[in-house]
Image (cartoon, rainbow, N blue to C red):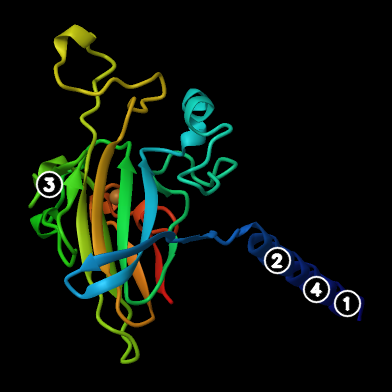
Amino acid sequence: MRRYLGAFLSIVIVAAIGVSVVLLLGAAAKPLPNLNGADQGTSDTPQGTLKHVSLTLQTFPMDPYEDPDWIASNVTGKSDNGIAFPSAIGDNPDWVKYWPTTNLVVPAHALVTVTIENYDSATPLLNPYYAVPRGISGQLTVDGQAMAEEDPGAVSHTFTIHGIPSADQPYLFVSVPVLGVNSCDPTIPPDQQQGCIPVDDAGMPAHPAVTTFSFITGAPGHYIWQCFDPCGSGFNGFGGPMSTKGYMSGTLTVE
Ligand SMILES: [Cu+2]
């Protein structure tokens, strides 16, 4: 009888450990906040006068909190275009990531202008299809210059919205290339490099390459977006931040 009691107690203890681990993991998984489009009034578009909102995102080669100098001069005491910057380092600080969140919310039947401030250098695209902006309203610009397409070798990331199979929401496909920063190589003397952006000790460039584009939303719906550039780790660069939600992918809610 005592033998059976021991086996029973062992099972209870193992089950208790298993339940505790599940509960701890659940508590540690912080949901990402939503970023709502900022009101820009109305704008004339090919589809008439529409509500206009803007979204500003950043893309980093690592968590910016790995670069205290950059945080001190760009984040401390400031806001990210009117909204709060992330206040602490995130999980997997060495991974490329979009900031301040990857859960985006915009109104239905609206013009959405997106600005992506990219601090990352290029990782050549595997598929040049994504070097051409698609599904946008008007022109894509980089640092104010219109770009009909980009060199697939000069792209850092893409911002690609696509649908979830559903008969209850309209089709929405938007894809733009995000041009990489031409960062200087810190191992080469500055006077031997031309046209590059200086980097600090942590490798962060002094200023980003700024991509801007707009698209028009239809009726309400739930979409996902992701990067299609092999900027991650593992097989073909599609592991790590490319296969974990919240770094190079997220949601777009049209409401
Ligand atoms: Cu990417």
Circle 4 — which element? Answer: helix
Image side of residue 183 versus residue 65, left or right:
left
- Which residue is at the far bottom? 167
Q: Does the residue at mark 2 contact the one at mark 1 (Cβ under 8 Å)?
A: no
Q: Which mark is residue 12?
A: 4
Q: Is residue 85 above or below residue 52?
A: above
Image side of residue 255 versus residue 176, left or right:
right
| Image-quadrant location for residue 194 | top left
Q: Does the residue at mark 1 contact the one at mark 3 (Cβ under 8 Å)?
A: no
Q: Residue at x 11, y 56 (%)?
A: 132
Q: Residue at x 21, y 68 (%)?
A: 45
Q: Which mark is residue 23?
A: 2
Q: Does the residue at mark 3 contact the one at mark 4 (Cβ under 8 Å)?
A: no
Identity, as a three-letter code, of the amino acid under mark 3: Ala
Marks 1 and 3, the one that precedes in the sequence: 1
Between residue 42 and residue 241, name the one nearer to us.
42
Which residue is label 3 attached to?
Answer: 146
Marks 2 and 3, the one that precedes in the sequence: 2
